[in-house]
Image: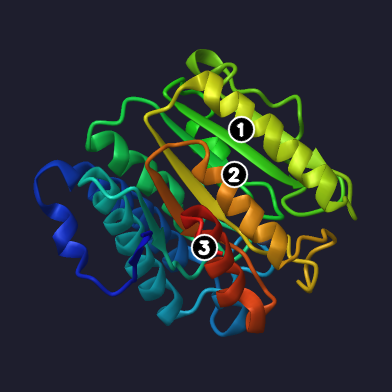
Amino acid sequence: MVKIALGQRQLTDLAEGRFQQAQDIAESFLLEIDPLIASLPGSGPARERIISRGTDYLEQLLASARAAADAAVTAARLVVAGERAAFSATRPPGHHAGRDFMGGYCFLNFSALAATTLQDGGAKRVAILDVDYHHGNGTQSLFEDRGDVFTLSIHADPLHEYPFYLGHADETGHGEGLGANANFPLAPGASSATWFRALEEAATRIAAFAPDALVVPLGLDTFVGDPLSSFHLTGTDFLRLGARLQALNLPTVFILEGGYAVAELGENAALVLDGFEGAR
Ligand SMILES: [Zn+2]
C-alpha cells in the first residue's frame, strides 16, 4: 500500500535527529521568503503580489506551505523507515520554487525536501522524475550542479508554456551535475503516445543512473480535462503511469504538484497510486 502523508503534522517533529538538515533547509527557504515579503513596497494588492504573476501571497498560504513541507518530509521518512511508497497531498505545489525564487503558485520546493530527507536516511543517489505539465524549474535549479540527484522532467515546451525560461532539452546540468539533468519538452497538444514515449526514455535514463530512491513530483495537469493543459492524458493513462513507476522498482515518494481540474484531481491521483499498487 502507498502510505498517505497529510499536512498539519508538527514541523517541530522534523527537528529530531537526522532530519535536522531537512528542517534547516525548510527554514532557510522560509527565512528568504520573510524578508522578501517585508521588503515589498506599499500595501494592499501590490504588496500581496510577489515576484511572479499568478503567485499571490496570502497569510494562510505560507502556513499551508509550511504544513506541506512537513507532509513531504513525513512521506520521505515513511519510505526511509521501509515503506515501499508514500504520497504527500501537498498544497500549494512546490516544483517552481528554488533557493531564492518562487513562482507558479509555488513557495517551497517539497520534492527537494523529500529528496534531501531520503539522502539523510541513507539513499546515496536519488532520482526526481517530474511529470507535471509544466517544467520543474525550481527543482532543476536546486540540483543542477549535483551528481547525486538526477532531475528529470516531462513537460510542455517552455517556448510556449510556463516557466518559459528553463526546461529545454539542452539543459543537462553542469559541474558535478553534468549529465544529471534531463528535460523532455513536448509540443503543445502532444498526444498521450508521445508523452509515454518520453516517459519510457526517462525510465531508461533512471535505470542507468541506478538511484536508491525515487521522488515523483506528481502534477496531474497533464489531464485531458485540465483547464491549463494542452495534453490529453486520461484516467487510463494515469493508471498506466502508476504501473510504469512501480516497475522502476524503487522506494518512491509522490509529491502532489499541479492539477486544476479540481473535480477530477483526487480521482486522478488515486488512479496513479492504484496503478502503482496494481489495484485496478
Ligand atoms: Zn503544472
Q: Name the residue under label 1.
A: 203
Q: Does the residue labelled 2 lie within 8 Å of ligand 1?
A: no
Local packing at callout 3 (Cα closer than 10 Å; few below 14, some 14-19, many 20+) is: many
Element type at marker 2? helix
State yes or no: discs 1 and 2 in contact (Cβ < 8 Å): yes
Sequence-first disc among 2 and 3: 2
Q: How far apart are marks 1 and 2 (CA)?
A: 8 Å
Q: Name the residue under label 3.
A: 274
Above or below residue 128? Residue 275 is below
The amino acid type, in three-letter code, at marker 1 is Ala
Q: Name the residue under label 2.
A: 244
The amino acid type, in three-letter code, at marker 2 is Arg
Query: How is colour applied across the structure in the image?
Result: rainbow
The percent coordinates of residue 141 (x first, y second) are 55, 36
**Residue at x 30% of width, y 40% of height:** 118
Q: Is residue 76 left or right of residue 111?
A: left
The residue nearer to you, when weighing 73 against 3, is 3
Where is the C terminus found, in terms of image quarters? bottom right
The amino acid type, in three-letter code, at marker 3 is Asp
Above or below residue 172? Residue 80 is below
Element type at marker 3? helix
Whether residue 158 is visible to the viewer of this picture, yes or no, is no
State yes or no: discs 2 and 3 in contact (Cβ < 8 Å): no
- 1 vs 2, front mark: 2
The disc placed on residue 92 is none
The percent coordinates of residue 248 (x first, y second) are 51, 36
Q: Does the residue labelled 3 lie within 8 Å of ligand 1?
A: no
The quarter of the displayed image where residue 30 is located: bottom left
**Residue at x 76% of width, y 29% of height:** 169
Sequence-first disc among 1 and 2: 1
